[in-house]
Image: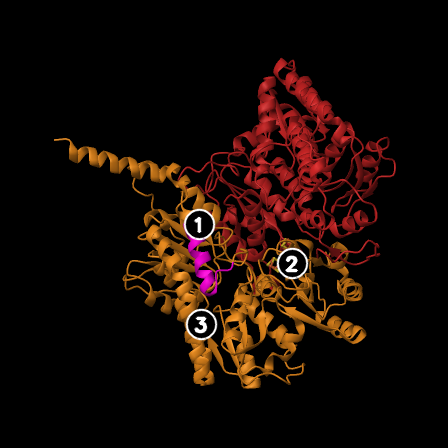
Amino acid sequence: MLEGTTAEIRERKALRVNPAKTCQPIGAMYASLGIHKCMPHSHGSQGCCAYHRSHLTRHHKEPIVATTSSFTEGASVFGGLANLKTALENIFTIYEPDIVSVHTTCLSEVIGDDIPTIVKKSEEAGIIPEGKMVIHANTPSFVGSHVTGFSVQCAAFVNYLAESNGAKKNVINIFPGWVEPADMRELKRIAELLGVEYILAPDTSDVLDSALDGEYKMYPDGGTTVSQLKAMGDSLATLALGPMASALAAEKLTKKCKVDHSILELPIGISATDAFVNALRIAGDVTVPRELEKERGRLVDMVSDMSQYLHRKKVAIFGDPDHLTPMIKFLVEVGMQPAVVVTGTKGKKWAQNIREICSEANPEVEVVPFSDIHYLHQWIKANPVDLLMGNTYGKYVAKSENLPFVRFGFPILDRVGHRAFPLLGYAGGLRLIEKITDAFFDKRDREDPDHEIELVL
Amino acid sequence: MKADEPTKVIQVLDDRAAQVWTKGSGEAFVCDRKSTAGSVTQRACAFCGSRVVLYPIADALHIVHGPIGCAVYNWDIRGSLSSGSQLHRNSFSTDLAEKEVIFGGEKKLEASLLELIEYYKPKAAFVYSTCIVGLIGDDVQAICRKVSKKTNIDCIPVDSPGFKGTKKTGYQAACEAAYKLVGTGDTSGISKYSINLMGEFNIGGEAWMIREYYERIGIEVVATITGDGRVDDLRRCHGAALNLVQCSGSMTHLAQLLEEEHGIPLKRVSFFGFEDTAQALYTAAEHFGDPELMCKAEELVRDEIAKYTPKIKAYRKELKGKKAALYVGGAFKAFSLVLALRALGMKTVLAGTQTGNAEDYKQLQDICDPGTVIVDDSNPLELAKFVLEKEVDLFIGGVKERPIAFKLGVAFCDHNHERKIPLAGFEGMLHFADEVAKSVLSPIWKFAPRHELRALKINTQIADTESP
Ligand code: SF4
Ligand code: SF4
């Protein structure tokens, strides 16, 4: 692998080498974990579920709980009806969740199991206890990616749960998109600073970043509650952060309960955070507190201090579309030059938008949706860059090309920072600038000949 | 949990009751079953089993035929080292899309294989089919035959869709696949004292260490299967005079095939801990019946033990009396761990595996102390319950158990194949002791509520007895 890539770009028709995406159910599982007392359930063979749990565990370093229908050869021929019924029965008696969130896998989709019918039958058979719920999302992986899995799961929350009784409350819904628990915490902090009442859904903070308290809780304290999900229908407005992850749910909610929505980029960097803060301000009819303005000012200040080191630096970046758009905007804002942008998810329009964002900073930017890290690596070999940004899998490229590397996105399997510090908001911007300049400077300090080592940078 | 609240009794799934057993209870024990639908099982699938076993064959192409996820989750997650080619560390997937699900993925598979073989020029190719491949009706065998013919590179289908069973089912499929290569290479020049090391995956370089032991005593190692594996070694491994099989499940089937069809005897060994490692060397020496081999083996064992004992003793002093729980993949590993922990002065109070069979558990029960809880195919709640009840100091397990242990304020040691530290052989024992000590003796546990409470209780007791 490390030495296995050539600069010459081969045309590949068929296959994926070192993918920059993964499958839908893991997104559905992550979203469901952000609901309080919710058991994510994987309807398929046990392998998929085990994989998704392990992968999330490696990223969050937290216990990830989910159940599986444990398909056997029989189920794969005759369908998984019986398996799901038994599973629901066992889950409600033993693990006592408030809600079970079923998602499908490739296998159950190919077989064509009809989840709502199975759930209805289970209800009739008295398997689902009074006051408890089963919801579902279809997440075959041969369409979409982990991001769309997250998105359809969020839409399922709305479909099944949101209701309105006509009387609007002065509350703003926020769909956070696929971001870290620390980022969700940051979104809440900003909303609270502004004094806006909000419902954040899903919310994985205090679920996937819980404290060591000597107890193993199958359902940690955090998560959006079912009653909050229901109440979303009565809110004044919805802010959907990240079009790919959140738009679907917001649109559903508008249709179902007539809650107006705006679709925003994830608040990464200066202008995207401005847009979020502004949207919150308008929706909540509040003023932006001085404290938040100061935070913004500190970010602009740090960028100005560091601008000579950032200016025109060429960046290779890969990740999920929702993360990439505002991140690239931020890179442009601080004077850097996105050189190549790769995502594993499909998106022609998205690519066009990225080109527009880069039109001044670098009109030649190479934007490739539905591609992989192998391609990115080949491109870099032919067109050297100054910095690589992406998830952990980028480390192979960084190592073989000796590039400063800033980790962001999903998954991060080999560092801990993403668990504690947000990348969202102005605070997240400060951290990004720190990470980027650290990566540059560490390399310089390591490699500069003795006589060129600088004390003050 | 509050200080004086009794440990909340966590219900064990009714269906699973017989899969949990306490030594000395006199009840029957059931294992080797499919996971119950709806349980939070720690088990993976058959595909995962075959993939991890064949993965270390470094100069082969490993391509996963299926939707993207199946390939992503096992991309370079194992600590198996290769001394040369790193080809196996890439992730190749046909990334099946809706179109192929409807019209079949054969064309895409064929094109992928042809492209990859031309580009990487591998020695052979393994094609793993995942769950949906059979359902959409792809004839993977036929494609493999076709591509083999076109390219002159052996393309070997690995038939282990996940739903066929646990990892163990996958091991069988992996052995069948590997066996396709066996017997196709030249065996001339192989010593009469020669072995294959089977079920050794070269985690953190373990296979290199063990190979060196055997070479030092005059025994040739024909192939390490599959650690630091090479296609050509597999082709000629039938020329070895003896198979040493490590790790209960994964390579037994291949060893049996070699015994049945090539008359190579097999012996089960373990390289974990001083006793087991020494025994593994003696087993081979004894088998060949040459006193000189045995002489050299004894000398090696003496030297190595002398080299590491003083250091181990130092660790033993610090670890004595600590209690351990283990939950590992195979039963054979569990046996060795119980013994190794004992060597460090520690006691095993909970032992479980994902894939043990009746015979394995019988043996496990025999070597454990009375009162040890034994579980098959467990889940987090159950494990957490026993860890608290038994006041465990150290948990040994895999990726899914680590954060649970930490939440409970219990130390953890990774003994699965994702680690990168060699724990085998004489030197490995030192690494093991070090790993255990690093976690168990970490000052951080002082701040874990469980220990804070314990300390508080002891203090108040002392105060009580002191006050008149
Ligand atoms: S159970 Fe089947 S579909 Fe799931 S990971 Fe295993 S092989 Fe893939
Ligand atoms: S079968 Fe589908 S859902 Fe399961 S791991 Fe593979 S890609 Fe993901």
Instruction: Tell whether label 2 touches label 3 (CB within 8 Å).
Output: no
Image location of residue B455, percent across then percent down: 30, 37
Chain letter behind tag 1: B
Based on the displayed image, in which of its 4 quarters is residue A236 positioned? top right
What is the three-letter code of the residue carrying label 3?
Answer: Leu
Residue receiving disc 3: B300
- A13, above or below B172, in the image: above
What is the three-letter code of the residue carrying label 1?
Answer: Phe
Instruction: Tell whether label 1 touches label 3 (CB within 8 Å).
Output: no
Tell me the number on the disc at residue A111.
2
Gap in angstroms between the C-alphas marked 3 and 1: 32 Å
> As drawn, is B376 to the left or to the right of B240?
left
Where is ligand 2, by quadrant?
Answer: bottom right
Based on the displayed image, in which of its 4 quarters is residue B56 positioned? bottom right
Chain letter behind tag 2: A
Display colour for chain A = red
- Which stretch did the figure color magenta? B422-438
Image location of residue B309, percent across then percent down: 38, 61
The answer to which of A118 and A204 lies nearer the viewer is A204
The answer to which of B133 and B421 lies nearer the viewer is B421
Image location of residue B282, percent across then percent down: 43, 77
At a point 72% along the width and 29% down the height, the residue shown is A264
